[in-house]
Every structure is written in C-alpha cells, then in structure tokens.
Amino acid sequence: MNIEKIYKDADALLEGHFLLSSGNHSQFYLQSAKVLENPKIAQLLADELAKQIKKSGLKIDTVCSPALGGVLAGYELARSLGVRFIFAERVDKKMTIRRGFEIKNGENILICEDIITTGGSALEAAQVATNMGANIVAFAALANRGFCSRAGSNKSMKATCKLPRDTPFFALADFEFDIYEPENCPLCKDGSDAYKPGSRGN
Ligand code: ZN
C-alpha cells in the first residue's frame, strides 16, 4: 500500500511554504483530517494498521485516543481490531477521561493518534489511562513524523520523542520533512512568504 500516494491523492500531504505552530517554516504539511474525510479510505488505512498490530500478537482490549485528532483514526482501528473504543480529552488543558468511560484494572489499552509528532498528547492520554488502571501495551498512528521510531523501521528515535522506549509503536509510514527556522528558511530566501496551513483554503 502506497501511503504517501493515498495522502497526496486526498490532499492531506500539502506542498507550499508553511508557517508551523512552532514558528518554524516547512515546505510540506500533513493535514491528517483530510485523509480521514473519506470513510472508505479511513477504513482501508485502519485495516492496514490493524494487520500490523495483529501480527505482533499483542492482546488489546481497548483503543483509546486523545481528542480531537486521534478519535477518527482510533475509532476505525478499534473497529478493525474488533475491540472497544474510548477517548481522552483536554479539560482546561489537562488530559482527562470522562463521559462515563471506565477502565478495568489491568485492561490492555492501545493509544491511537492520527499522527505522531513527538507523541506528547498520546503520552498524556496513556498516563491518564494508567492512573485509572490500564496496562498500556502499544501506541499507534496512521502517520509518523519521524521523531519516534515505529515498529519494523530501522530509523532511530530522536531525543524529542516522548513515547516510552519500552512500548511498541505502530505506524503506516514515516513522513519526515525538513523544518527551518525563519532566518534560515530557503523558501523565504527564494522570496515567498510563509502562511499558516488552512489559511488559503487548505
Ligand atoms: Zn520560510
């Protein structure tokens, strides 16, 4: 399965001159929500991810996603795996699990995101679930930005990856883009202006 082509065809992998929330610039931007706009493609991607996870032999009772980004990917993955789905959400910036979702002591939980950059939100969701009794068996995402190392890849994990080193992380593909500080951005040097993704209709 050519994941990059699927993202490109769905206009989820954008090319331009982007101003990232970090203040840095990049030529590429991953708009994960766009690839999940079509439920059939979402299902296809989740099935592919589920295949990897099943092959690992891990026992998973529940998929939990940090809202909002991870919810669609996690829900589709739970459907593919045939397990329960719950989500964590921020209330006053603090990650919580509410809405009556319960976690049994020792319940095997996989944390799923649409995209893992450094994995900060995924880690926070894992910590909340752990506090409620969960046993975190794995992390998963459709796309990996290349800071964390996915199962089966020989690319090394960067120091900024927040996911625990001793828990497997499954993802379909690595999307590694160069990121530039504005003063060293070759796109700026070429004379164009950086813009926020979404501000020009994308
Ligand atoms: Zn620039």
Image (spheres, rainbow, N blue to C red):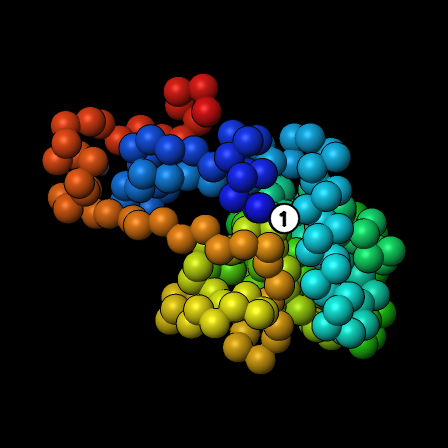
In the image, farthest residue toward the front: 1
Q: Position of residue 79 (x, y in %)?
A: 82, 49
Q: Residue at x 14, y 28 (%)?
A: 191
Marks counted in the figure total 1
Judge from the rendering whether residue 201 lies leftward or rightward of residue 121; answer left or right.
left
Q: Residue at x 55, y 31 (%)?
A: 9
**Picture quadrant of residue 59:** bottom right
Q: Nearer the viewer, residue 135 or 3?
A: 3
Q: Position of residue 65 (x, y in %)?
A: 67, 53
Judge from the rendering whether residue 84 lies leftward or rightward of residue 53; answer left or right.
right
Q: Nearer the viewer, residue 66 or 8?
A: 8
Amino acid type for the residue under numbered disc 1: Met
Q: Nearer the viewer, residue 124 or 1?
A: 1
In the image, farthest residue toward the top: 201
Look at the picture and state if 183 lies above or below 165: above
Q: Which residue is mark 1?
A: 1
Q: Residue at x 62, y 63 (%)?
A: 170
Judge from the rendering whether residue 126 lies leftward or rightward of residue 40; answer left or right.
left
Examine the rendering and report whether any part of residue 112 can be seen.
Answer: yes
Figure quarter occupied by ligand 1:
top left
Q: Residue at x 76, y 46 (%)?
A: 76
Examine the rendering and report whether any part of residue 117 can be seen.
Answer: no
Identify the element where label 1 is drawn: loop
